[in-house]
Image (cartoon, helix red, strand yellow):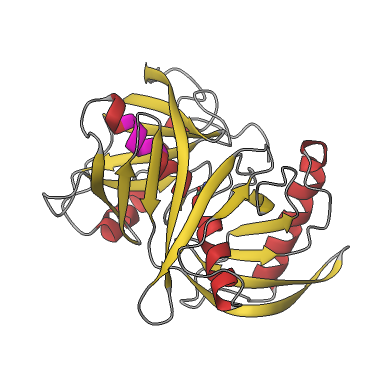
Amino acid sequence: MRVIDSHTEGEPTRVIVDGGPDLGRGSMAERRRIFAERFDRVRSFAVNEPRGSDAVVGALLCEPIDPASAAGVIFFNNVGVIGMCGHGTIGLAVTLVHMGRIGPGKHCFETPVGDVTVDILGRNEVEIENVPSFRFRKDVMVDVPGLGAVTGDIAWGGNWFFLVSNAPHALTMAEIPSLTRTAQAVMDALETAGIRGEDGGKIDHVEFFSRPTDPTADSRNFVLCPGGAYDRSPCGTGTSAKLACLAADGKLAAGKEWVQESIVGSRFQAQYRPGDHGRIVPRIRGRAYVVAEATLLRDSGDPFADGMRGAP
Ligand code: PYC
């Protein structure tokens, strides 16, 4: 399997450019289902230890349905498939530029949750127009064992998010273990209480916010992803969900820039335009850098040939 690794504002993406499974020619949602049901070993092989880590997001490059699109893509991580991935889309775009497959200008990527447009602004800088995003419920209270009542909004940004405005710990690198434990407890409590997204989708991302460290940013976040790893980038789908909440509250006008700082201090520049049915269409700008081209090998005698998770 041939892969190209990059990071987007600190968060790694591994694009499978050759040697991935054939998922047929159905819709991207259908291909994601087939990948999840029949090729989970391939997912684990590609991103888990010893070849990867819990933080790596994989991107399986597919033939697009529409020949005018630049690519189809299925995103996945250490525990399963995900809907959309903002940092991964930026990483994929920079990877395709690195491969000479796309150049400056706009290109369409097909994902299981809808088409996204990427605008290549430079070798490392990309702006994506994400899938339409919206807030589903405001001020939802959930009782979290050991913590008490936590209130947040539920919003869609390509994945389902629970957004908590007042982070329960300081958003510093030193607090990452506590932030991870608390965000996981919130995610588990939402599931136990049967609190889900509009389509019954599991809320598998929890996002805490505080004031930014750098006063030129608007906000700082910590995002816990399914599988227990935190997003090193400001999270493209999480920033989209945040924009949807700000728009719904009348706190951010269409076209006005929002700078989202991540827990590691990296940034996305974001804005939105109004979409249909009360949704917004977010635009997220960030930078990615290619860090490796590799061939992943499999030794059938290796007891961990299909990858393993080093930490629970
Ligand atoms: O950037 O949307 C994102 C993302 C989702 C999970 C990790 N990164």
Residue 89 appears left or right of 9:
left
Residue 50 appears left or right of 99:
right
Name the spot of residue 283 as percent of width and height, x first.
42, 56
User: If the image is split into quadrants, where does the C terminus sit?
Assistant: top right
**Image quadrant assignment for residue 19:** top left
Name the spot of residue 198 as percent of width and height, x first.
50, 78
Residue 39 appears left or right of 182:
left
**Image quadrant assignment for residue 196:** bottom right
Q: What secondary structure do most residues of the magenta stretch adopt?
A: helix
User: If the image is split into quadrants, where does the N terminus sit?
Assistant: top left
Can residue 82 be seen by looking at this rendering? no
Q: Give the range drawn in magenta.
A: 91-95
Q: Is residue 122 above or below residue 217?
A: above
Q: In this view, does 115 lie above or below 152?
A: above
Residue 195 appears left or right of 12:
right
Report the residue at 58% width, 71% height from top: 245
Report the residue at 87% width, 64% height from top: 147
Q: Is residue 55 above or below residue 284?
A: above
In the image, is residue 92 part of the stretch drawn in magenta? Answer: yes
In the image, is residue 65 part of the stretch drawn in magenta? Answer: no
Question: Relative to the observer, which residue lies in front, 86 or 281?
Answer: 281
Q: Which residue lies furthest to the left in this view?
A: 67
Name the spot of residue 291 as percent of width and height, x first.
45, 21
Question: Relative to the observer, which residue lies in front, 60 or 302?
Answer: 60
